[in-house]
Image: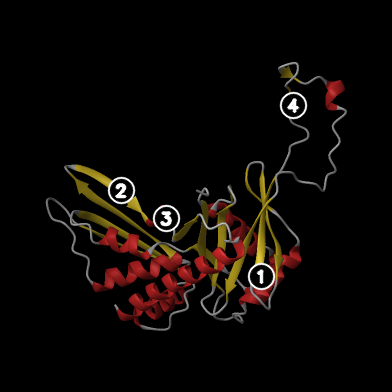
Amino acid sequence: MPRKQKFQAVALSVRIPDDKERDYSSLLTAILSQRKSVEVFRGTGMALTSFNPKSGNGTISKFSIIDLEGEWFDESGFGPANEKDIEKISIPANLRPNLISKPIRLNSEDHIIIVMNYSAGKSVSPTQVEKYFRAILSLPPIMEEFGAVQIDLYKDSDEIDEMLKIETLKEIKITVSRPNHFDKDLAKEIEEAHKDEKADEITRTIKTKDNEYLEPGARTLAFGYLAAENGNVAVQYDDAGATVASTSQSRPLIKTEMTDDPESTEEGIFAKISRFLIDAVRANRRNFLSS
């Protein structure tokens, strides 16, 4: 029986400010044109290495950054390498080893970027992908053309729903960042408050004391659904007398697909996973708009 293959992808919510043209295809094209990488972790670099504005498909790549000036280990001598051996090392400055490339897909309508973070036994970290985009979006040429673009890993709204329905909640803290794309009720109110007060984010905290427990209402649930897009939900609850903390920051929306079909291709699986994630995002938005 063939061994099952694992494929996994995540979604990122990207928001161009409303005083700029919200052209997400042009945004990724501009990022690619910068031809810049970001060190997302010590010794690990990342870059957007391809993007087709017509199809919305592209590639993000991870690679190792070697410190040639650092200490070297000699396996044959099982100790520090001597200067004579180190002088033989010759790696062109433009080359980076351990390349891993994964497909991405832009859905402009929903301002969502889908990233295949695991396939063929190799992975890229979703949080490092988020870190890369945040760094590259802060470059002066990008900010000049598109403004202060925000990007977040999309949180799992089902997990947020479960967090807000814990029966022993003592504290709820919900943070929502600007901008958001909703022009309705609570979202519009929050966006206007951001603008009026020149704030980058708004946090709503509710607490209870003594032996009382919170009972979140429709407004709090709606606030939580919005935070799945561009914010965070943090709760504290009672568990047999102990206070337990939980946050949506560690619960991104992830879709995993396992298959033992030898005819399956990464391209085909990625298309399937992308549809699932986009449908999940749209379902959360419907829940928010109807709450």
Q: Residues within 10 Å of mark 4 (few under 14, many from 20)?
A: some
The x and y percentages for residue 72 are: 74, 26
Q: Quadrant of residue 58?
A: bottom right
Dot 2 and dot 4 residues touching (CB under 8 Å): no
The x and y percentages for residue 38 are: 67, 53
Give the residue type at disc 3.
Gln
Residue annotated with mark 4 = 72
Q: Residues within 10 Å of mark 2 (few under 14, many from 20)?
A: some
Which residue is more in the foreground, 52 or 172?
Answer: 52
Can see residue 184?
yes
Dot 1 and dot 3 residues touching (CB under 8 Å): no
Q: Nearer the viewer, mark 2 or mark 1?
A: 1
In the image, residue 84 sits, relative to residue 262, either above or below, namely: above
Q: In the rendered view, does 270 fall on the left or right side of 288? A: right
**Cα–Cα span, label 1 and label 3:** 25 Å
Q: Quadrant of residue 219?
A: bottom left
In the image, residue 280 sits, relative to residue 242, either above or below, namely: below
Dot 1 and dot 4 residues touching (CB under 8 Å): no
- Which sits earlier in the primary sequence, circle 2 or circle 1? 1
Q: Residues within 10 Å of mark 3 (few under 14, many from 20)?
A: some
**Cα–Cα span, label 3 and label 2:** 12 Å
Residue annotated with mark 1 = 28
Give the residue type at disc 2.
Ala
- Which sits earlier in the primary sequence, circle 4 or circle 3? 4
Q: In the rendered view, does 115 fall on the left or right side of 184? A: right
Tell me the SS state at disc 3. Answer: helix
Q: Quadrant of residue 234?
A: bottom left
Give the residue type at disc 4.
Trp
Which residue is more in the foreground, 202 or 96?
Answer: 96
Q: In the rendered view, does 149 fall on the left or right side of 287? A: right
Residue annotated with mark 2 = 245
